[in-house]
Amino acid sequence: MPLFFKDQNIWHKASEATTMTSDNTTLSRRIRTLLIVTFLCLAAAECAARIFWYWQFDVPLLHPGKILYSYYSELRAVDESQPSHHDGYYNILFLGGSVLNPYWSSIEQTMDQDLNLAASKQGHRKVRIFNLAEPAHTSRDSLLKYAALDKARFDLVIVYDGINDVRANNVPPGLFRDNYDHYSWYQIVNVLSTYSNTTVALPYTLHYIGLVLWQRFHDDDYIPTAFPRAEWTTYGKNPLTVLPFQHNIESIINMASQRKDHVLLVTFAIHVPKDYTWRKLWEGKLDYASANVPVEIWGEREHVETTLALHNSVIRNLAAAHPDVHMYDMALALPRSHRSFNDPCHLTAEGSVVFATLLDKLIEEHW
């Protein structure tokens, strides 16, 4: 072969090699660019997610794992105080609904004053009460909040739940969920609670957006946030909440055992006069000090009383099954009259003092 053609062949091969190298370099550069752009987009989305939760719900920018602050802002005070078994205080945690909330009763204030007075006389540690009880919250909320306090430790956890769980029965059986996902509230907090220890906000933000959009198009599948739907209250005769209620309370007991926290279960006291009607309630003709809340907010009267009695039986049975758990039968001990009750469950000033005093005595006995 002439030398000219040999040189030309070599030139073509060199040219092809150069072209392939150039193509590989270009591809590599494009992949790097794509990865950098993807990373920047994800970083921007993560920043936007954190800013959203901080702006809307005051979730710490640097601690996205505190996402439950968005629905349980009361957790923040406990996290900031970080109670422990060896901090020099006798730390008490309240879990429950509005009856324990300081806006609705003086139970917390009375117990704080009386227990600290007794402590100073007997040489015990000063008492601190951390109150996580909030209006409308159920045993499910109590469980999620207690689980979120993974670093806090308490000398006593007082659980006063029962009546708000009753309301979850006012739904067709096919829609009922054991974790109360048939409430839009619980469908979201149940999901967010699984991200309590996460280091990124974007995954749960996308999950949250998806749930909110789903709920907007399926609003008829959820229990309303105010009164139960009139056409659904008939389903309240079937107390499906008994087993979930038991699961929630027993989970708190088991978690407390692992944390070496003592637990005090309290049966739920209710007062519904025999001549109760909604009309008489608002007209002030019943044996109540005032007329704050009608029993119908939890369902039909007969269903509420029957289901609450079953929930109280769960409390008694769990206390019997766990010898290390204390129990006070407030449902039997609290006097049922206008002197104690403003409405079916919320207490007067006198009722709050009686409630607090009964628990104070039990606590002092076990100091």
Image: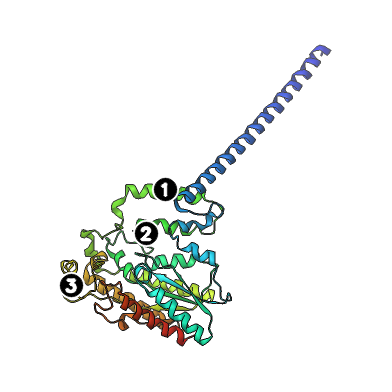
Q: First in sequence: mark 1 or mark 2?
A: 2
Disc 1 and disc 2: Cα gap in Å? 15 Å
User: In which quarter of the view is residue 8 placed?
Assistant: top right
* Secondary structure state at the residue bearing disc 1: helix
For the residue carrying disc 2, how many other residues have a C-alpha within 10 Å: few (<14), some (14-19), or many (20+)?
Answer: some
Amino acid under label 2? Asp
Figure check: 349 above or below 174: below
From the top left corner, tell me how far across and down residue 227 is, in percent. 26, 60
First in residue order: circle 1 vs circle 3: 1
Q: Is residue 133 left or right of residue 150?
A: left
User: What residue sits right under mark 1 in the picture?
Assistant: 210
Label 3 SS: loop
- In the displayed structure, does residue 74 sit left or right of residue 103? right
Give residue 69's mark: none
- How crowded pointer 1 is (Cα within 10 Å; few <14, some 14-19, many 20+) is rated as few
In whole angstroms, how far apart are the C-alphas of marks 2 and 3? 32 Å
Q: Amino acid at mark 3?
A: Tyr
Q: Position of residue 109 (x, y in %)?
A: 41, 74
Q: Quadrant of residue 81?
A: bottom right
Marks 1 and 3 sit apart, C-alpha to C-alpha, by 44 Å
**Along the polypeptide, which appears first: circle 2 or circle 3?**
2
Residue highlighted by disc 2: 181
Name the residue at 50% across, 66% down: 78
Which label lies toward us, 1 or 3? 3
Residue under pointer 3: 276
The local secondary structure at tag 2 comes to loop
Q: Nearer the viewer, residue 93 or 322?
A: 93
Q: Position of residue 282 (x, y in %)?
A: 19, 66
